[in-house]
Structures are given as structure tokens and as C-alpha cells.
Amino acid sequence: MFLSLFLSIGAILTFFSLLVVNAYAAGIAIYEQGVSGLGNAYAGAAASAEDGSTIFYNPAGLIKLNKPEASFGAHVIIPNANFKNTGSIGRNPITNSTYSLSGNNGGDAGVTAVVPNLYVSMPVDERLVVGLGVNSPFGLQTEYDKNWVGRYHAIKSKLITINFNPAVAYRVNSKLSLGLGLNFQWAEAEINNAINPITFAKFGDFTTQDGFAKLKGDDVSFSWNIGFLYELSENTRLGVSYRAKMTHQLKGKIEFENIPTNSTKIFKKDDVKARLNLPPMLSVSGLHKINKNWTVLADVTWTGWSRFEELRIKYDTLVIGDTVITTKWKDCFRYSLGISYQPNTKWIFRTGIAYDETPISSDKHRTPRIPDTDRFWVSFGVGYSYSERLKFDLGYVHIFFKKSYIDKEPVGEDLLRGGLKGYYRGHVDIISAQFRYAF
């Protein structure tokens, strides 16, 4: 049994590594960490403990898994994000004159991606369960046409994370269980953008051709998550979980293309570093079984995005000064409600809604790298038990995005990037599938 379990883990980890390279999410937090909960819009995620994804949502929920099992899920995320220019202008710092920025609207900035999750759990005895989760808690990918109007702000932005989350749950008594998890996370970021040709004038290069910059870096960091599960009765339970903050010190290289002759002495390949502050998360969930068929679920999740105030890129030898993208994000909440209907032991049907607040504090701090906004979820799901050992889950979500605006001025850090003005319309569809096998 143990040999087959570890061979299965190895095969699935190989598949995970091939898929996660295109991870994308609204904002950079990925909440799609399990398929069974997706059907309920993750209402009650810290209390339901249906499968191994509870390692992410509340490790104390492992205590509800009384057989060794493995689950593997994948989410096909299909985003749509379209920008409309409403009068973006640039400023020439030499003549102090303004001009209309050239370029199109950038096309659809959303990139379809597959985000997988893997979970394995193993009861040690009636009071102790251990488990391992492999997931991608944060991710981002947006990409615009190379000649779009906001090309000096962003062309391509990409963040990948792979997180290993071993966890343990301990039953204190018949009502209370506690959980603890550790998180070892690898992150890789890649960003590129055009360079305004006015930048090169101070070095004696008078050109109308854009230059291009590409930066790539990675890091490994560590954090933890805890939770408790309290069973008020056989039909009602409460779950609370906390995921601690994490900081990545990304290190890598920057390279340049299409740089005119004199400026190549300044814009050359160099080592770079950047600090990425990822947030703590606190979730409170409830679950109540009305009867043998119907269950209602609810969740409130707080995310501490206020620690992400800026992205500052520092260069080892370049004398161009730090590159700064001011974000000034704020803490935000996510609210969800769900209902499950189980007509028999074979089938379960799920639905849910959620309202997810954006951390972006104002239109002037919205960046085309992450054109995030408030969003509303409508979700549906179904689970099927093929046998006592093998189960399948399917889920679908449509996410409605609130219209969002960018209102930047060509001053300060955006002097040469330009005053990008316009709005975004978009939505996301998510199709998810999972199988679970009990050993």
C-alpha cells in the first residue's frame, strides 16, 4: 500500500511541474486549491473537510479523513480582461510637453492556464492524522500586444509558485481538533515592458524606436498555517484557520533589447533583486446539516494585503536607480455562501456564491500588470462515488468582474511610463475536475 501510494505521488508531482508554469489568478492569490469546495464557492472551506484540500483551508480538518487517501485535481482557468484607452498621454521631460500615447488597446490580457493540486493523507491512529499538500497559492499571468498603449508599464507579467505543505491534525477530545502545517514555497517571477525612447535622449541617442527590458528571478521561502475544528454537534461544526505571511527575496537577471548605441553602456545585463511581500489569511467557516440530504455552508476570509505597498527592483551595478511600482494595497475580505444536496450515497450536488473584494486602494494605483477589481462568483459542482475507494468531483465557476479604471499621471515613477487612462471589462470561467482514491 505504501509503495503504491508514493509511486502515485511521484507521478502526479511530475504532472504538476509541467502544468503550473502558466498559473494565473485574479490578483495574485489563487483560492482554487480543491475541487469539491469549488462547487460551493469555497463556502465552509475551513469546516467541511471533505478531502485532502483541507490541508490548505484548515489542517485540523484532516482528522475527519479516517482512511489513507490521495486526491488530485486540476482547474482550467479561462480569464478575459480587455482594456479600453480613454486618453492616455505621455510627457517629454526635456520640453515639458505632453503628447498622446500611441498604440492599440492590447488585446485580451488574460491567459488560459491549468492549476493543479495534490493532497495525500494518512491516519496514524484515531487521534492523529498526517498529510501533504502540493499546490500553487499565488500566481499571475497577463500579457498584452507588444505595441499597446500601456507597453511602458507592462507587456508580460508572470508569477509562479509551487508550495509543499506537510500537515498534522490532532483530536484533543470529541469536539475539538487542532491542526498545524508547514509551507515550503518556490516562487519565480518574470516581467517585461517597453522602454520609452525619450529615455535614451540624455545619452545622445535620439530615436523613435522602443527598447525592451526583461527581468526574471526566483526564491524559496518558508511559512506555516494552523487551524482548529470544533464540532458543536454531529450536524454542526465551526472551523477557523490562519495562514501566516510569507516574504520572497527574489533574485535574478535583467536583460535589454533594441537599445541604441550610446545607451548600451547604461542598459546592460545585470543582477537584480526584489522583495515580494505575500499576505496572511484568516478564515472563519461554518457548516450545518439541516437533514440527511441538505447542508448549508458559509465562510468569511480576511487577507492582509496591506503589507504589499510596492514592488521595488534593485540593480547590482546599473546606475539608473531603483524601478518602483507603487501598489499601496489594502486588507480585504471574501464572503461566501453555499448549499449541498445529497440525495443518496452516490451523488452530491453543490452550488454557491461569493463576493471577493479587491485589495487595490485607488484607480491611480491599479497597474496593468494586475488590473484587479471586486468580483462576484456563481458556482456549481457535482460529486460521484464510484465505489467506497474511488470518487470524482466536477466544478464550474463564472466570475463577474466589476468594471475597473486606471488613472495614472505622467509624473514621478510614471513620468516615462506615461499617463495611462482607461478601463477594463472582464470575467473568468473555471472548469475543475478531481479524483480521490482511498487506499
Image (cartoon, rainbow, N blue to C red):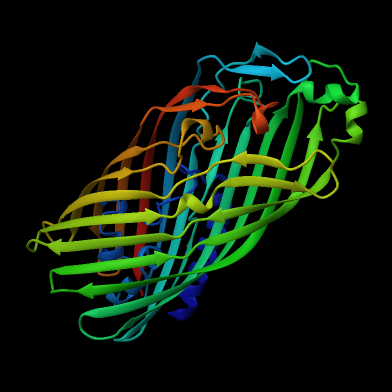
Evaluate whether residue 345 shows in this view: no
Q: Is residue 220 above or below residue 362?
A: below
**Residue 62 quadrant:** bottom left
**Residue 318 quadrant:** top right
Q: Nearer the viewer, residue 83 or 349?
A: 83
Residue in the image at 39% along x and 66% along y: 242
Q: Nearer the viewer, residue 200 or 34?
A: 200
Q: Residue furthest left?
A: 291
Q: Is residue 194 above or below residue 232?
A: above
Q: Residue furthest front?
A: 96
Residue in the image at 19% along x and 62% along y: 287
Is residue 131 left or right of 7 when viewed as pictured?
left
Residue in the image at 70% along x and 46% along y: 313
Is residue 310 left or right of 49 when viewed as pictured?
right
Instruction: Tell me where residue 117 appears, x and y as whole percent.
Output: 45, 58
Is residue 346 left or right of 2 when viewed as pictured?
left
Instruction: Tell me where residue 378 appears, x and y as whole percent.
Output: 27, 40
Residue in the image at 55% along x and 58% along y: 162
Q: Is residue 222 above or below residue 87?
A: below
Evaluate whether residue 53 shows in this view: yes
Number of residue marks:
0
Image quadrant holding the N terminus, namely: bottom left
Image quadrant holding the C terminus, namely: bottom left
Q: Is residue 152 above or below residue 51?
A: above
Is residue 152 left or right of 309 when viewed as pictured?
right
